[in-house]
Image (cartoon, rainbow, N blue to C red):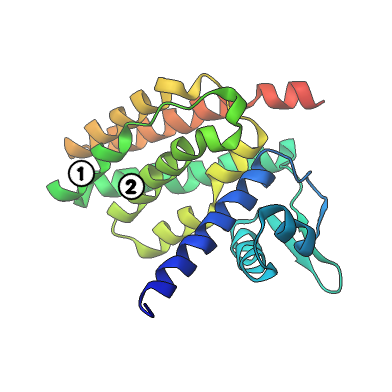
Amino acid sequence: MATMRPARRLTLTEDVYSSVQALIMDHAVAPGARINIDALARDLEVSPTPVREALARLEADGLVRKRPLAGYTAAPLLTREEFEELVEMRLILEPPAASRAAAVAAVPGVDRLRAEADLPDPRPAGEGYTGIAAFTAQDARFHHLLAELSGNRMLHEAVVRLRSHLHLFRLHFPPAHYGISADEHHRVVDAVAAGDPDAAAAAMRAHLTAARERHLPYFGRAS
């Protein structure tokens, strides 16, 4: 029986992390709002410990902030300036990663990348972030794997640390992402598979630029 406890503990920790993440992504915990650990634990019917563990992970994700003597608050949404800076940073990092991957990636890595290029359909809109969580996670895996295939560990770590998918989809999940992002992913994969660094970089640059355009309507509504 003792060997089962870590598995159950891990499942609880992951469940609480996913639940709190969804509350923040759906703005059920409003941007900038203070997070009451005890109240959240009661709502989730768990002890405060897994909630604290979840918040520590979410702090690393950039979704919550911890201040001395004040506890945790939900991070504010990206401003237009921060959004543009995030896009610019991705354009600095990810096209070169795609280019390097096209130059050095072996067939097994390309096969893994192609498997991640397709994105799951979102579930009904009423489910909130839960309905798009699988889409968001796989989209992130595609970009992270591509950076890994570049063979540059620091470049890979920089792409992962941005947590760009969480921040962008917390702002706005454009319906135009459905299907279009997967098509753009496959153009990147095709260029990587062909061993064409210039085409891979161009395809990634086009994908990121198109994704920027899909998110821009949020700022028109928010202004």
Report, in whole angstroms, how far the alpha carbon at label 2 lies from the one at label 1: 9 Å
Q: Position of residue 159 (x, y in %)?
A: 47, 53
Q: Vertically, is 132 above or below 178?
A: below
Question: Callout 1, which amino acid?
Answer: Val
Q: Vertically, is 145 above or below 219?
A: below
Q: Residue furthest right?
A: 69
Q: Residues within 10 Å of mark 2 (few under 14, many from 20)?
A: many
Whether residue 147 appears in this view of the structure is: yes
Q: Residue furthest left?
A: 107
Q: Residue at point 25% right, 38% down?
A: 115
Q: Residue furthest front?
A: 1
Question: Callout 2, which amino acid?
Answer: Leu
Q: Does the CB distance between marks 2 and 1 fall below 8 Å?
A: no
Q: Quadrant of residue 60?
A: bottom right
**Which is more toward the observer, 178 or 191?**
178
* Residue 82 placement, left or right of 11: right
Q: Residue at point 52% right, 29% down?
A: 211
**Which is more toward the observer, 223 or 1?**
1
Q: Which residue is mark 2?
A: 146
Question: Where the C terminus falls, by quadrant?
Answer: top right
* Residue 175 placement, left or right of 197: right
Q: Which residue is mark 1?
A: 110
Q: Vertically, is 68 above or below 202?
A: below
Whether residue 197 appears in this view of the structure is: no
